[in-house]
Image (cartoon, rainbow, N blue to C red):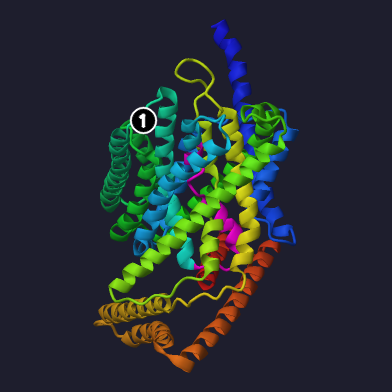
Amino acid sequence: MRGCARAFPHALEWLLESVTIVLVLLLAVVVSGAISRMVPFSVPAPLVQIGLGAAIGLAADWRVDLEPELFFFLFLPPLLFLDGWRIPKDELFKDISTVVELALGLVVTTVLGMGLFIHWMIPEMPLAVAFALAAVVSPTDPIAVSAIAARVPIPRRMMHILEGESLLNDASGLVCLRFAIAAALTGTFSASSAALNFLWVAFGGLAIGVAVTMAVTWTKYRVSRRFGEEVGSQILVSLLIPFASYLLAEHFHCSGILAAVAAGVTMSFAEISRQALPATRMRRNSVWDTIQFAANGIIFVLLGEQLPGILHGARDTVAQAGHQEIWWLGVYVLAITLGLAALRFIWVWVSLRLTLLRRRRHGETGQSPEWRLVAAMSFAGVRGAITLAGVLTLPLVAADGAPFPARDLAIFLAAGVIVTSLVIASIGLPLLLRGLKMPGNHSVEAEEDAARVAAAEAAICEIERVQHALAEGRSDADVYASAGARIMDLYRDRIEARSQEGEAAEAARREQGIERELRLAGLKAERTAIFRSVRERSLGSATAAKLVRELDLMEARYRS
């Protein structure tokens, strides 16, 4: 009992320290968002977060021992699940061949090509370790690209391709890393067993993610339909699905990352057939937005916090490369970053040319993409959290008990590639995309107009049916007719505005824009009056909260 009593204060101290670290990381995320908006020139939030993390690592006397397995489990399942859930499925399937070529073909080519290049450039690094380093720098990070391109125009289709690529290349890169580590430890490699293992890892992870989501959503739908729907439990279930998929896939030695992605994609299809309550969707979106913002920020703050420790051993690390001068490490980082960009540029250019050739064989016409778009796709290959967590999974010792060869060197180079690719993309992407003429999305606009018209027509029919049913046999039927007419007039105005073409359509859009600004001004005035009434104590806080929520929902509708 005395031993337990002595151990308890230490456990409590460790817990308080862990909570303090989490709170400091969250505060850094909040501050980084403010700083990125305050600076006069465009600085992406990930770079600010890395800088703040480095400052925390230098100023504080504690260090975060980043366990890769725990990092994977806490951060990747919810983020990848959300990406798979929210990515536009039609756009993804439209470019599925390009996405697969980038996520699978480019990753394998990068591992082979860059692995040989790194071993040639640094002969002291064994070939298997060079392949492992090439595997961890092959996955891209769309989070950083989104932050960098937030203030410059970026083609929607290009962003969808980058998002789809990132959903799949994480798994392929980490599978290649697993094989490279096994080859470094055992000294042997079997292509046939590697291919079979890859198929099991990939398809097993996809199947488990789909099965878990379908089972959970079906059960949730049955329970909600019979006993009612509770918003809090529905949100909690959506948070548990990615972790359940990840853990089950890892239990069967499949890809937990692909399981989380498949669960997210399946979730979007399951939501179509088994709809949740509007309150559930709104609150769930708010919760997931908060989780996405916090987790993405913490990832880059943690990366910055690790940099001082990595740089601290730079003098020892440079000896592993066979040099004495530290600047050689910078040369290697820059060479690897430029090599990745050049290889990506060649692959993207060849892939697009082959896509155009296939379309022309089917009688379709296509215009060759501008070289700046191809270059932007190359610069958009920014490395991030997967690269850092992947390289930290390199074992500490080899099979014979000796230190794992060139481990610190690989970690330093991977961290350098992450930061360098972020800086280059921050400078290069805005220059490449500035003033770039984008083709209009007329088909998307027409599709949206047609959907709004069809929804409005369905609403008019249902309002007429309900109006007649309510007014049947009543003496005040004219009241129901008047109320129904007012509501149907709103839908008819929407149909008329969406059905016009040419100059009439342009005039209708201008009128809608003016109406939108006037409505937003009116909502702002309403909200100000309500807050003033609360301050004057002429309105209760509960009533004010209800009214403000209604105004907020209306404003969100007009701003969407």
Magenta-tinted stretch: 133-155
Q: Magenta region, mostly helix, strand or loop? A: helix
Residue 60 picture location, percent across and down: 73, 32
Residue 265 picture location, percent across and down: 35, 53
Q: Amino acid at mark 1?
A: Phe
Residue 397 picture location, percent across and down: 51, 20
Q: Is residue 318 above or below residue 143?
A: above
Judging depth in this view, the residue of 170 and 535 nearest the camera is: 170
Judging depth in this view, the residue of 157 and 511 nearest the camera is: 157
Q: Is residue 260 above or below residue 191?
A: below
Quadrant of residue 493 within the rendered picture: bottom left
Q: Is residue 15 above or below residue 134?
A: above
Quadrant of residue 432 within the rendered picture: bottom right
Residue extending farthest to the top is 2
Residue position for label 1: 189
Quadrant of residue 405 within the rendered picture: top right
Which residue lies at the image location 63% right of the left edge and 72% below the top edge? 524
Q: Is residue 150 above or below residue 446?
A: above
